[in-house]
Image (cartoon, coloured by chain):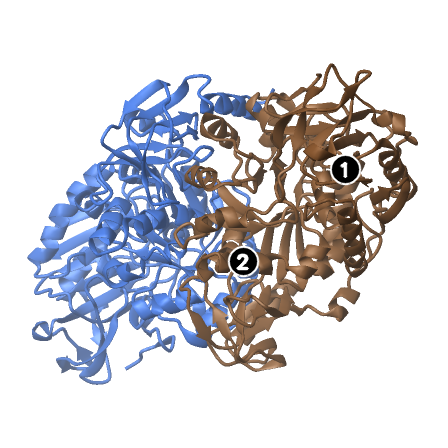
Chain colours: A brown, B blue
Amino acid sequence: MSDAIAFLARAIEQGQGLAKADLVLKGGRIFDLVSGDLIPGDVAICNDRIVGTLGDYSGAREIDVRGKIVAPGFIDTHCHVESSLITPLEFDRCVLAHGVTTAICDPHEIGNVLGQAGLRYFLDGAMATAMDLRVQLSSCVPATDLETAGARLEVADLLALADHPKVLGLAEFMNFPGLLARDPACLAKLAAFQTRPIDGHSPLVSGYALNGYLSAGVRTDHEVTNLAEGREKLSKGMAVLIREGSVCKDLHALSSLITERNSSFIAFCTDDRNPLDIAEEGHLDFLIRTAIKLGAPPLAAYRAASISAARIFGLRDRGLVAPGWRADLVVVDDLESCAVSTVLAAGRVVDDALFASRGALPPVGRDSIKARRVSPDDFVARGQGPSTVAIGVIPGKIITERVPVTLPYRNGERDVDLDQDVVKVAVVARHGVNDNKATAFVKGFGMKRGAIASSVGHDSHNLCVVGTNAIDMAAAVNRLTQIEGGFAVADGGRIVAELPLAVAGLMSLSSFEVVRERLIPLRAAAKGLGVTLAEPFLQVAFLPLPVIPHLKITDMGLVDVDTLEFVRD
Amino acid sequence: MSDAIAFLARAIEQGQGLAKADLVLKGGRIFDLVSGDLIPGDVAICNDRIVGTLGDYSGAREIDVRGKIVAPGFIDTHCHVESSLITPLEFDRCVLAHGVTTAICDPHEIGNVLGQAGLRYFLDGAMATAMDLRVQLSSCVPATDLETAGARLEVADLLALADHPKVLGLAEFMNFPGLLARDPACLAKLAAFQTRPIDGHSPLVSGYALNGYLSAGVRTDHEVTNLAEGREKLSKGMAVLIREGSVCKDLHALSSLITERNSSFIAFCTDDRNPLDIAEEGHLDFLIRTAIKLGAPPLAAYRAASISAARIFGLRDRGLVAPGWRADLVVVDDLESCAVSTVLAAGRVVDDALFASRGALPPVGRDSIKARRVSPDDFVARGQGPSTVAIGVIPGKIITERVPVTLPYRNGERDVDLDQDVVKVAVVARHGVNDNKATAFVKGFGMKRGAIASSVGHDSHNLCVVGTNAIDMAAAVNRLTQIEGGFAVADGGRIVAELPLAVAGLMSLSSFEVVRERLIPLRAAAKGLGVTLAEPFLQVAFLPLPVIPHLKITDMGLVDVDTLEFVRD
């Protein structure tokens, strides 16, 4: 009798109450996401499977959950683990405690640095995590031809990984202009994944363009930022993955989409969320409680976090607290607070012992910052006159504005104007492919002195620096080269705070607790420069992303995303 | 450029309105099953895919649907095509016109007669139909050891077919007692299909037994007959496939389950439906309009018939009228009437030309009735006294009652009592395996003279006959042997009506129109015997099914289904 048959025999026996269950959550109430009712009764578990509900069970191990509510484990439908600044194993430790038993990640940050080796690192990581980490294969590495990435992933590279058990489908298809123009390399990737989940990324795309985009088989979007956009996309069969990350916070704008009627077409995601926010606010638990606070029906919010997400991505085994379903479970004090007390991942109680039992994941991408030493002269901003356009940052958004500005102008060089809140932004290529550098202007940081630099620079992850003066900009960038990448704050020519991210210049070698603690002085140092943004480093990191409207900067220059042309003024 | 890439390029171009679409439904309204709104706009189609909604499109071909509503094609989630008495190609012609663009069938009727060859016949048929016919592999052939079937399907037989593109998963697991008792052959089949849809069949199973059943990974049930049963099953994560067949009519009892809240966990099915009912009432269109008439919200009813069904069975490409989705479309006059005017199957207009373009499907199972000639003496009902139990038929149900009766008794033989509405029922083995015969009594037919016989006798399809006298019973049974199976009505020692079913004794060689027309005099002949049941032949056909409570008859004897023992009184 094979293992699978022996397991079924045990599950059926335990489900009937003929033998003690492996584990029982005793005395709580189940949140039944079909009826919406809270139903008293034990939850019996055999190995990784729920085998009994709505009854009394005895277990070899029993956990008292009297007074509490058992809900299905939460599913983050779209995230870049790299944006948490920690490795997959630390991400696992960090978010599983918040009830996130499944995360669907797109490793395109590390993919842009290391190519297929970066994706393999995540697939290896996914085999080791206690949570079920699923991988969407990065569709757009590099995202565009308007920047220099460290690698290029073609359809053959993706197909080589497609049969891995942790792979779901194709990750966010950011290159919507390429898709709409029927670029053959884009179409080849799309054609190869037609029967599998193809994740979308189509900020503000609507009307006939959206129809064209969806015709390629794209089914989901986490880039929805306003209600009208959400309603059109839902009506066109596109599941909306409402995002609340560290930079992009769409939940307030979209909470009224979360109705019972819509609920099976709505899910949640974090996209990019750092461990400080996870510690201070939470993860999907935070999204659920915030959605409810904003007026979403609890049934719709919990569905979005579990069964709807599972169905949207074809994960048939999870999303309900019911016999035969995967024992991914979250015990909460009450629906509104979503205060998580106990988490079960595939039937295993989430605790230190579980994490200690995992396999190792050797780091990759050490010494990946291959930029040459820069000098203040590298950040001169030449132009044809005082008038130009600055990137207008919007707090909590990665969409930017195109802001016409008139700046101090002398000897063919433009300079910052702190009175207008306009400072310099530059990108320095770091993949060893070339020595590209580009400098332009950004408005909205509130920065009064110094500079902040980051080796996290979506999506090609060149070095990005925002500063009031070229000396501090050079100091911050050069420091990143010394510490294998990360974040640095320079003031008066010296480094006042930093966080090394030695894994591909994206992730820390330290625990999530250490990263979390180091982010506090780092944020404080940025604020010390006058920066008024809540998430200065992540807002820096998104300034290069030329697939998000309207104005962005790469190592090749300032990009008008609406026309996909460089601004040469 | 491969075909798939060329197709995507065309779809994206047409979706953007940059080229004429292949086909446009002009000027109607879409029933948006996400929002519940009726939204004006054209539907543009490229090949088999919807590429445009909510806009104006031009098409190489255009169909005017002004004043009408475009809904997603309907999905019958569980049916036995054999019960329509016609071949898969005729079923296709018959139901596609009613908007049924997908049917999930379980060919276990023919499987019980011909084994794997019967399943292969359906897989070949599924490749030829214009609708998308999907096949669940029959899990329980034979359904029990309490009857003699023509074949036996073990897990290896199923696995040999599992990779066929039309196979979804494992068909209704009727042998719930075997599952609960952890019978190794049952577990082997269940273990082999754990990651695929496993259809259930668990009439009145509840509580711990239901938990045990669900622990095996079963996810759906079409045997729900009352509200409390439906509510428990839904709460335990079991999708309820509400059935309205020719015999089993559960829609009235269950219509109040069809709410917006539940709607993504509810689907429709017909199970067993004959072409006369399809002609007179309809198919899934009838279920939809009836559900609405009974108070179901139209949104919930149409969801159950399309997107919910698709999601429950993991058919990711269909169920909405939206760009990128499969162009299975139904044009109806209004939501309430569900009067179907035009149907598109994978983008092709359903008409005679489409059916004419299909491939052929040579019949199988000719001359499959291998019973020896019977005589009236074969239908003597011996017993130990006048008291026994009769099978109590319930009009429109396949569940039967166990009715204690006291009958005329002489020389150790019991006889019919027309005053009590109790007549004989017998089953004659017909697979050439043995010469088993069993005779007992049935109450509730209203029959006053003659006999009716059927080679359709679920699920092992031995010959089943109900009659007031042994002479007519023998005449009817012997006629079935002559005509390769079918239905026969005998009166006064001669045959007064018949319908040959030469394909495995289950399906006609004729068109559905011919079968429909022949069912009218057949029903009339049965009524001429005094029979009061609306569907006398199908009620006969379900008398042998020993997986349905409470009292049934097989070629091996009268079966108490609750104890799974033969009644030997």
**In this rendering, position of residue B33 left or right of residue A522:** left
Which residue is depicted at the point 26% across and 51% down? B481
Residue B47 in the image, given as x and y percentages of width and height:
43, 25
Give the residue pinned by disc 2: A290
Q: Is residue B380 above or below residue A222?
A: below
Q: Residues within 10 Å of mark 2 (few under 14, many from 20)?
A: many
Identify the amino acid type marked 1.
Gln
Q: Nearer the viewer, residue A93 or B112?
A: A93
User: Does label 1 or label 2 sit earlier along the sequence?
Assistant: 1
Percent coordinates x, y for residue B407 in the rendering: 14, 80
Please give left or right for residue B454 compared with residue A401 in the image: left
In this rendering, position of residue B61 left or right of residue A127: left
Report the chain holding disc 2.
Answer: A
Residue type at mark 2 is Thr
| Residue B83 visible, this orientation | yes
Q: Element under label 2?
A: helix
From what the image shows, is residue B362 above or below residue A3? above
Residue at position x 64%, y 63% in the image: A98
Tell me the quarter of the image containing the N terminus of chain A.
Answer: bottom right
Expressed as whole percent of the image width and height from the top left, the position of residue A192 reads 61, 32
| Element on which disc 1 rests | helix
Q: Nearer the viewer, residue B154 or A400?
A: A400
Rate crowding at label 1 as few (under 14), some (14 to 19) or many (20 or more) other CA atoms within 10 Å. Answer: many
Q: Badge 1 is on which residue?
A: A116
Asked if the residue under mark 2 is in contact with the one under mark 1, i.e. CB atoms within 8 Å, the reply is no
Please count the marks in the image: 2
Q: Chain of mark 1?
A: A
Checking the image for residue B379, the label placed there is: none
Q: Position of residue A17 (x, y in %)?
A: 52, 79
Q: Nearer the viewer, mark 1 or mark 2?
A: 2
